[in-house]
Image (cartoon, helix red, strand yellow):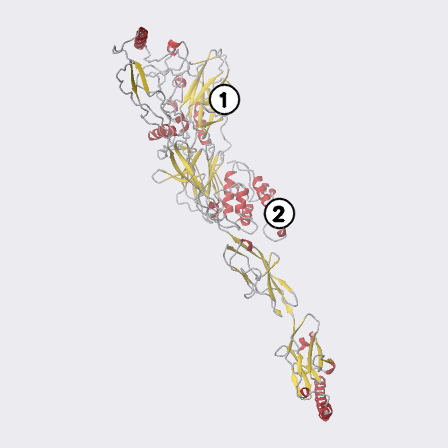
Amino acid sequence: MGALTKGRFLFTVGILLLVNCTTSVVSKGATVAQSDSSPSVQSTLPHFIQEPEDAYIVKSNPIKLRCRATPALQIFFKCNGEWVHQNEHSSKEYKDLNTGLKVREVMINVSRQQVEDFHGPEDFWCLCVAWSHLGTSKSRKATVRIAYLRKNFEQDPQGKEVPINGMIVLHCRPPEGVPAAEVEWLKNEELVSSLTDGNIDTRADHNLIINEARLSDSGNYTCLASNIVAKRRSATATVIVFVNGGWSLWTEWSPCNVPCGRGIQKRSRTCTNPAPLNGGAFCEGMSVQKITCNALCPIDGGWDEWSEWTVCNSLCERQRSRECNSPAPRHRGKMCEGNSEAIENCTDGLCTQSMESSNDVALYSGLGAGIIAVAILVVAVMLYRKNHSEYGVDVIDSSALTGGFQSFNFKTTRQGNPLLLNSSMQPDLTVGRTYSTPLCFHDSADKELFDPLPDIKVKVQSSFMVSLGVAERAEFHAKAPAETFPRDLSRDYCSSSMDRRKKGLFTLNGPLSASKERLRTDGVFGHPGGRLVVPNTGVSLLVPHGAVAENMSWEMYMMINQEEASVQTLEGCEILLGPEVTYGPPGLDLFCPLAMTIAHCAEVDAENWNIQLKRKTLDSKWEEVMSVEEDSTSCYCLMDSTSCHLLLDQPGSYALVGEPLTQAAVKRLKLAVFGSMEAGSMSYSLRVYCVDDTPHAFQGVVAAERTRGGQLLEEPKMLPFLANTFSLQVSIQDVPQFLWSIKPFTTCQEFSFPQVWCSNQQPLHCAFSLERYSPATAQLSCKISVRQVKGHEQILQVYTAVTEVEKDSVPFFMQTDCTITSQTGPKAFKIPLSIRQRICANFDTANAKGKDWQLLAQKLHLDRNLGFFAKQPSPSAVILSLWEARHQDSADLDSLASALEEIGKIHSKSFPKDQDEAEPDINHIHVGSLCGTGKGEDSAPEYTG
């Protein structure tokens, strides 16, 4: 180091001596040079044409520093306060063609090692010193630095979800570097520039600012930092611009859906103003509104009374008139039929009559006298027969005059038990229960199973009944069914059903209405959840996993109400479509709704039915919770063909109620025929049941027949029963006449429309009593026809061996396989817990690729009333609970797995570039993992409850 310093000192001294010598020579030769040099040159200090510039050493490549000055005799570099050795300088001299002056240029190299070895208080620097005959000039300092760019960003941009028109700010702090890195932004690998888009600002501290977010601004953003050394990319930030749904305007109210009477008007709106996009919130509120309407029914015109006859005119005629004003036709009603005027000849002697007219008068007078005589004779005969009848029956029979067989009506004249045709006579106990009232009957043995059914209507198919001397009769007091619907239905049927409710004849409980047995099940449930089932009733309750807080448990119950609960609070033409179900306890506090399933008996059609879910209030009245066709955020109702699946968060009593809107509304009936041999008798009894097609209602029939020792003779069948106000007829056909006999006029029996339509889960039944001629007869074959007038028909084929069975024998169709009433933990669910958690983790969070719970709901066909799911903490978990309730009777996990697989395929086709990204993938949830038969805790064994 000492040698180097000494060398530099000697080099400096040499330069000073050289400069002095040069100055001396110049001074001595000034006179000589004056003639060749311009005066301006002699009086000018060196002027730098090019000064050294700041430079950066990239990797190990040296940099060059240049200086140019004129006029200059010598130029030397000085770095960090010390002169650079002359040998390290590279110089040249040339003449400027424009000015004619000599220009001297000097260049040196600076290596990376020189810069690294310098340890001064400031950066490595160099400057130029130029000499002329008048003195020296110094250039600016030029710094030399080693260039670099670190790898890691000091701050990466973060993904955001912002509403449309909101502000987006993405922060980016580039890595440390020399020189400082410049920042650019990429969107989906394309450069973003504020010069081409005034809505974007990229100049503020390397941040990206989007003043008003647009849908097109959704994408993957990357911060790109670069200098002369390298380029660095930040982590990608996903920006989702979402749109919250907004309701469109309400449509106009639709026309009343019935031409006459009480109907419904609808109006709707859609969540399309705007439609929710990119995980935006769904609209809250109802999409459909309904109001009742009353279409004015046509009123046909009616005639007034005839006016008085006018005075006989000269033509021997007189006139009278009437007007169509009682009432006048209104609302498209028909005009009166017939003539408004009448004209007849005068016969009171005031006018002159011709012989021909006199003959006509005599003829008419004779006919009138003959008609009066016949009428008197008929009345006399009827009075005589009435007085001599030992049965007390008033018979109106026109067949004696016409010779044909026609229908007739008859009634008893004595008061007494309406179930007995003649209270003064001792009933025939062997046959009285089976055909004394050709309809649904109730003897003393059945009072705990069936209530008396009013308004019995009977049609007898032969007019010579009196001559047979049959003692059994029925009281006829049913009104004729209404002819039109829904106008007459609203007046006759609805008022009739309301009267029955006031009398307490229709109740909300099931077939065993008088029984004190309670269909109830209960269990204790904790955080794992579970399921409650009332066996053989189609009623169940699913408690989802996580509904109960951890370290907590609830003793929950569910029951089908069996008490005499009146439905007087049901309005208009409403009927019960399934059992009334209660779950509790009151005050139940859960984190997510429970899933309840109730079987129903309606053919679901929004055009023909108005179906509502009702809840019982504290004062035992029914209030509407929701209509199944409307959206609601308080509860969810999914109607399948035979069951209704409810998502409820409030305990209480619930019932599914329906109101027919048109004559095409259909209620399903289950038909069954039972038979039993009466002990010690030649008689065989056939009992035909018509009951609402729900498992709970049919179990009442099963219980009743079990006590009788009855046997099911044919597989139960379903009959669609129309709301057309026409009755239901039951008839027995094809009975072998040479082997069996049946009481006359009991082969066809009939239920009135209100009895069937308003049965409210209670069974109707009628019976046929057959007597065999010989004990050797061991077989019975016949057909039972059940048909609705102007409706559908169903045939029950009977072919059975006639044997006596013990009364406590159990019918073979009892569903003994369903005995589990409570299950808790993973065994109660089809979907293993680990799979359920993975599905919820993937779909609960919305993302730019469309993989969210709304897509899951769509693929599982649960994409209506999405507003209910949107308000849940975990929409996917609630959707899966509803799927569990819907598929509880089948272990069909393939449909769920197929839906997930389809979502995965759609995702892979729509976003092929993202296949290698490390994110949760629903494609890993294979069919095998759902349908496997693992032995772990999360396995889903077959559920038979």
Would you say 519 lies left or right of 195 here? left
Badge 2: residue crowd in 10 Å (few <14, some 14–19, many ≥20): few
Identify the residue at image location x=30%, y=23%: 304
Image coords of residue 777 (percent x, y)? 50, 13
Quadrant housing residue 656 = top left
Image coords of residue 828 (percent x, y)? 51, 41
| 239 over 553 or under it: above or below | below
Q: Nearer the viewer, mark 2 or mark 1?
A: 2
Numbered tag placed on residue 677 in the rendering: none
The amino acid sitting under disc 2 is Lys
The residue that disc 1 covers is 796
Q: Closest to the observer: 315 or 620? A: 315
The residue that disc 2 covers is 909
Location of the N terminus by quadrant is bottom right
Q: Secondary structure at mark 2?
A: helix
Residue 467 visible from this viewpoint: no
Toward the front, the furthest residue is: 314
| 320 over 525 or under it: above or below | above
The amino acid sitting under disc 1 is Leu
| 155 over 488 or under it: above or below | below
Residue 114 visible from this viewpoint: yes
Image coords of residue 225 (percent x, y)? 61, 64
